[in-house]
Image (cartoon, rainbow, N blue to C red):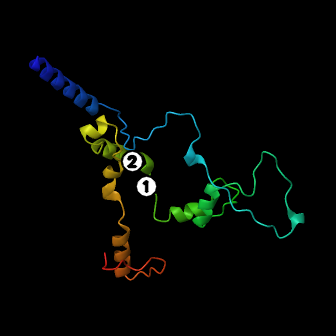
Amino acid sequence: MARHLTLTLILAIAAASLAACSGDDDPRLMNVRSSGTGPDEFAILPGKPLEQPPSLASLPAPTPGGINRTDPTPEADAIAALGGNPRAAAPADPALILYTTRMGVAPGIRRQLAQSDLQYRRENNGRILERLFNTNVYFDAYEPFQLNKYRELQRMRAAGVRTPQAPPPPFGGQ
């Protein structure tokens, strides 16, 4: 009887190990899934603040179902933050493209990065029990690439870069 129990236990462990080893060609490190059909909370953007116009006579006519002055415009905001013209007539703002490509452009960089990241995720897909129990291994896998803000601040200060917006170093240094 004990022999059958031992054999069953060994077979169960082997099956679990094989199940943990098999998987997607595209490893998912976050393991965050939604089984519902509700809204995507990450797609919700806060509206812009209301403003009092200089003259109420200069208000535009209402556009039911159209755009609103307080509607979020993340693309235009990003273009403006990078020094581009969000109201440029062309779909691609030449000033923005000139600024972002000033150091050169590597052809096929998106494909190359996607392949490198896929390879990295395959190599850092977690240990057997982490895959078996579907735990989140994203932060462990990408930890070598995280920026240590205190070390970087110390490096910048040592290089003579003024950092008035940064808080002073913590007591005892770091």
Q: CA distance from mark 2 to mark 1?
A: 10 Å
**Residue in view at x 34 percent, y 37 percent:** 134
Seen from the viewer's position, the closer of residues 17 and 62 is 17
Q: Residues within 10 Å of mark 1 (few under 14, many from 20)?
A: few
Mark closer to the chain start, 2 or 1: 1
Q: Residues within 10 Å of mark 2 (few under 14, many from 20)?
A: few
Task: Name which residue type carries label 1.
Answer: Ala
Element assignment for label 2: helix
Q: Which residue is mark 2?
A: 112
Image quadrant in which the C terminus is located: bottom left
Residue 59 quadrant:
bottom right
Q: Position of residue 78 (x, y in %)?
A: 59, 60
Image quadrant in which the N terminus is located: top left
**Residue in view at x 30 percent, y 57 percent:** 144
Vertical relation: 49 (above or below) 109: below
- Say left or right for 29 vs 92: left
- The mark found on residue 106 in the picture is 1
Vertical relation: 138 (above or below) 38: below
Q: Position of residue 104 (x, y in %)?
A: 46, 61
Q: Residue furthest right?
A: 57
Q: Is residue 94 visible?
A: no
Q: Are marks 2 and 1 in contact (CB under 8 Å)?
A: yes
Element assignment for label 1: loop
